[in-house]
Amino acid sequence: MDPSGPAGAPRLSCEPESHRLAVKRAIDLWFHEYELRSGHQQGYDEGLEQGIERGLEQGKAEHLLKLLRARFGPVSEEIEARVRQASADRLDAWAEHVLTASSLDDSLAG
């Protein structure tokens, strides 16, 4: 009897051990694909969260720069760079302080 199926395709064995190995290979492949998708999704989620956080920081920096300009006039490139590099917490503190500060330097103190 010819061990190949139609058009030369290999025939599947009816042996229990062959069946067990085929099922194990299918399950292993499924888990491998699942892990790849899960890792990809996790990377995507982390990247999205970082992008959102960075966008919020940029928005806070722009808002603070507008407040500083409205209150004290033009700001130097040095001050602008300092504001753009600040953390979200620092930007929040400066934004609150700008309301009561007597000078631009005083606004960014601390």
Image: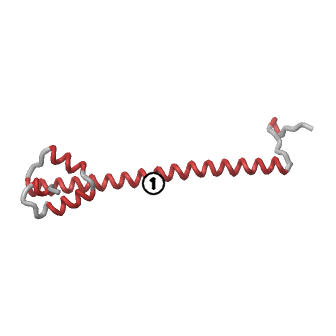
Which quadrant of the rendered structure holds the N terminus?
top right
Image position, residue 104 (x, y; %): 10, 54
**Left or right: 62, with 34 as reference point:** left
Q: Is residue 28 left or right of residue 79?
A: right
Q: Nearer the viewer, residue 63 or 42?
A: 42
Q: Secondary structure at mark 1?
A: helix
Where is residue 77? Give x, y as percent: 15, 43
56 vs 74, left or right, is: right
Residue under label 1, please give it: 45
Residue at the far right: name it: 1
Question: Image point 83% across, 42% down: which residue?
Answer: 11
Q: Residues within 10 Å of mark 1 (few under 14, many from 20)?
A: few
Q: Nearer the viewer, residue 1 or 13?
A: 13
- Say whether residue 6 is left or right of residue 103: right
Residue 103: x percent and y percent? 7, 56
Q: Position of residue 87 (x, y in %)?
A: 27, 54
Which is nearer the eye, 105 or 60? 105
